Image (cartoon, rainbow, N blue to C red):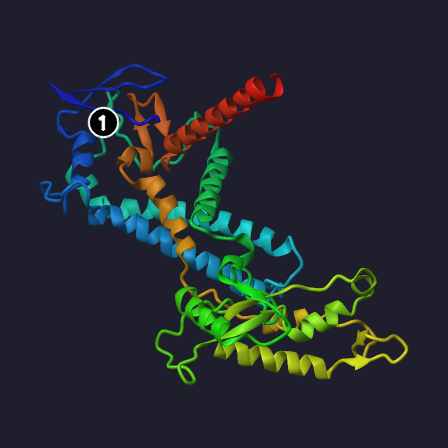
Amino acid sequence: MYALESHTRSGQVFGVSPHFAAVTTFHPSTTTTSTTSTNNQRSIGGGPSVLPPWITPPNDLMPLASGTMVFTAILSLSTLMQLKIFRISTGTPPPIPTLFGITSVATAAYCSHLTSIKAFRMARQDVIMSSNFNLTNRHGIRANFENAHAIDLDGGDISHVLRVCAFGLLAFKGLGGRFWSIAPSNITNLGSFARTIFSIPATEKYASPSQRQMIERLGRTIGCHTCGSRKIFYRGQNGVKFIADHMPPQAVVKQMNARWYRRLFGIKVKQRFYPQCVTCSNLQGGLLSKATQKLVVNEKKANKYFTFRGKVMNLSNAGGGKNAYNHGFTFRKEHLAGGAVAAATTLNANERDVLGGESWGGLIQVKQGNRGRFLEWQNKAERAIHTVVDTFKRYIVFR
């Protein structure tokens, strides 16, 4: 928003800004403007433009790739911390997994933003040096494009951080991400990759042959609901790679249906079949068998399960805690949200917007991070919301 739109005319740069109108004169030794740098974005190694406009040059790919990798790494670290430190899984009562997920995605988005700026600086270093990009303003002061201290024309650092985090959260959701699914998969509960649309109704009986075939197709298409694997290189047992997993499992349903309020009102737990790989199915069976053996039936209170300490044990949590599955190293399409944040920061942007620096003869110092673009998007979103609200009030409320 605060970057100059520059054109070279007789050694001068003419720009249009919403805040100032000024003419900046080049230093005699400097005859290249940011327009030259922008044109170099479509070239390889700073040479003449050789790439068609629909192909992203390598210099632009570096920030996108680094942003995606950092985003993925932060979410992987979050999954590991929830498993090892906080003992949180997908079976943990809401909204705890969701809150952890929102915090993790926001943190990952801002880290991707910072990383893309660093990658942009590295990728454009040769362009900046070869183009003499450190321009000298009319006061003879050389512009420093790594200067991060600037006038808060965009609302300050905190406002910018919130914009970047909000953009990352929206990108994550737009790519189909779910905040609670960042938590490790509870093996005896719905896994991180479980989606209701990729399941089928179930009863207490085992799956029929047609249901098993459908689950097998779903598993090979979208993967195991616990670990996410499609078992591409696994031959399976007699060609079977996925099991129709009762969710909740039968032992858990038996315990849940035995609760007094369900027996009083006749409310029974509904089950669905989810695709689960043979490995996770065997692990689930072992955990439930071990947990069931630790239960002691109190003869004085029928249908109540107790541990040796006399407390009710919830079988659905047997696969959580330290027994949960760490899926953090599995790449998912929603991890591309990091690349989206990096693209919003660096794509089709010049060096002053991304790296910061002086403009208008030192009257303004633009902060790094392409803050003008994020502020412009915020303003557009606010105007759209106001338009919707005004329309609602005009045609619905006051009609």
* Number of numbered labels in the structure image: 1
Query: Which quadrant: the N terminus?
Result: top left
Q: Say whether residue 360 is left or right of residue 302.
A: left
Residue visible at 38% across and 30% down in the picture: 372
263 above or below 237?
above
Going by the image, does 123 lie left or right of 102? left
Secondary element type, mark 1: loop
- Where's residue 116, x and y in %? 34, 47
Compared with 212, 119 (above or below) is above
Residue 238 seen? yes
Amino acid type at image mark 1 = Thr
Image quadrant in which you'd find residue 183: bottom right
Q: Position of residue 244 (x, y in %)?
A: 52, 73
User: Where does label 1 land, which residue?
Assistant: 136
Is the residue 219 above or below the residue 10 in the image? below
User: What is the residue that sits farthest to the right in this orientation?
Assistant: 300
Examine the image and state in which quarter residue 18 appears.
top left
Asked whether 102 or 210 is in front, the reply is 210
Is 328 located above or below residue 350 in the figure?
A: below
Q: Position of residue 241 (x, y in %)?
A: 43, 77
